[in-house]
Amino acid sequence: MPIREDVLVVGGGLAGATAALSAAETGASVRLVSYKKSTLRFASGFVDALGYAPDGEGPIADPFEAIAELPADHPYSVVGEDAVREGFELFDGVVGDAYRGGHTDANALLLTHGGTVKPTARYPESAAPGLASDPRDALLVGFESLTDFDAPLAARHLSAAGVPFSVEGVTVSFPRRFRADAKVTRFAKALDRDERADGAGTRRALAETVAPHLGAAERVGFPALLGDERADEVRADLEAALGAEVFEIPTGPPSLLGLKLEDALYSALDEAGVRISTGNPVVDYEADGERVRAVYVDRKGQRVPYHAEQFVLATGGLVGKGIDSGRGGVEEPIFGCRVPHSEDRYDWFEDDAFGDHAFARFGVVPDAELRPTDEGGGPHFSNLRAAGGVVGGADFAAEKSGGGVSLATGLVAGRNAGEEAT
């Protein structure tokens, strides 16, 4: 029998998950199809709304106040402020007490592993004591076997940035010895299990290693590896032993904070009754005039059709391969949706590495219902919508707006698709 749903979402990241949840809330039957693991596992776990204006001004204190000043083609301008708020409300319902920031419209300033301060709208509870606005002195702790977080360098960067507290950094040996290429998950499991090391549990041994460096610090920041299944317990034990509040600082991939967010989203999808198909790419589609009838998934060389009444494209931007670029130009590779761009490739870039690069805003051009449009401004397909990084008009990396755009466009695209399908 052919696979058929009311709504089919292509893409398994934050935008795709949000679209699927939003569509399911309408009562529609929903399937999410994703090829590779989502990029959440490579992300910080922070969910940004709008940290900087398109002209680079910022950091922005209140992202919602700034939405009205954005260009007309920005995704926030297309969906409106209410949709941005509703997207974050949906997110808050999924993550519950595991995240902070929902009590205010204002951005929070959080420490990052590079020693910078990042404006963000939602952040894991385990990172909350690391607020840059907190005046308490801090100690940053890195590990000799984990080279992607240089705690002394990060501390120097923060001091140079003028944070309102004294900060020091130290590099110590982790109480357990691992291979040089061990992933952060190995450290986390050792702390979860409290594995023995030199006669003491790993947590106690870690606290004893850090304590001589504590000085006057009232809070201690570690790379985000303080447990997985028993993370709250690990932090509580370290805090009791150190007499200081403990917080986590996001690290490079694989990101435990990103993995935990992914787990929360997919648990919510399961609870909402969304069917999930992963591991096989969507390679083609079938259309009847102005409507998509099905997409085809490549399953070990076989083309398997997935039929639906409505479709949501949430495959990401250039980084996620939802937008492809090559010598022939720039394209959306599944449905062939229009991606405006200059024929002269030199127009895509600026000489300044941190300049206003046109390629950063490449994506499909949506109408008011988030349907990708053709050259004439009409919908490419009447039952296809787009969400997240595949939507053009914003430089998510420079603006620190990717999370909010995924939530807002995912919510609107999914809800519109679900309502029209039912």
Image (spheres, helix red, strand yellow):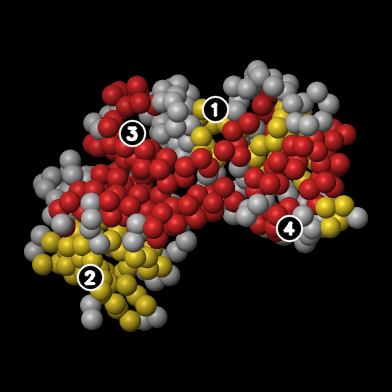
Q: Residue at x 51, y 40 (%)?
A: 97
Q: Nearer the viewer, residue 393 or 134?
A: 134
Q: Position of residue 100 (x, y in %)?
A: 51, 35
| Occupied quadrant, residue 298 | bottom left
Is 146 rendered above or below residue 131?
below
For label 3, the crowd category at 10 Å Cα-Cα, with few meaning under 14, some 14 to 19 and many 20 or more, is some
User: Mark 2 or mark 4, which is nearer the start of the sequence?
Assistant: 2
Cα–Cα span, label 4 and label 1? 32 Å
Q: Which residue is label 3 attached to?
A: 85
Cα–Cα span, label 1 and label 3? 20 Å
Cα–Cα span, label 2 and label 3? 32 Å
Q: Secondary structure at mark 1?
A: strand
Cα–Cα span, label 2 and label 1? 45 Å
Question: Which numbered dot is residue 109?
Answer: 1
Residue located farthest toward the right when viewing the structure as drawn: 199
User: Mark 1 or mark 2, which is nearer the start of the sequence?
Assistant: 2
Q: Residue at x 24, y 48 (%)?
A: 415
Question: Which numbered dot is residue 4?
Answer: 2
Cα–Cα span, label 4 and label 3? 39 Å
Q: Secondary structure at mark 3?
A: helix
Q: Residue at x 11, y 48 (%)?
A: 378
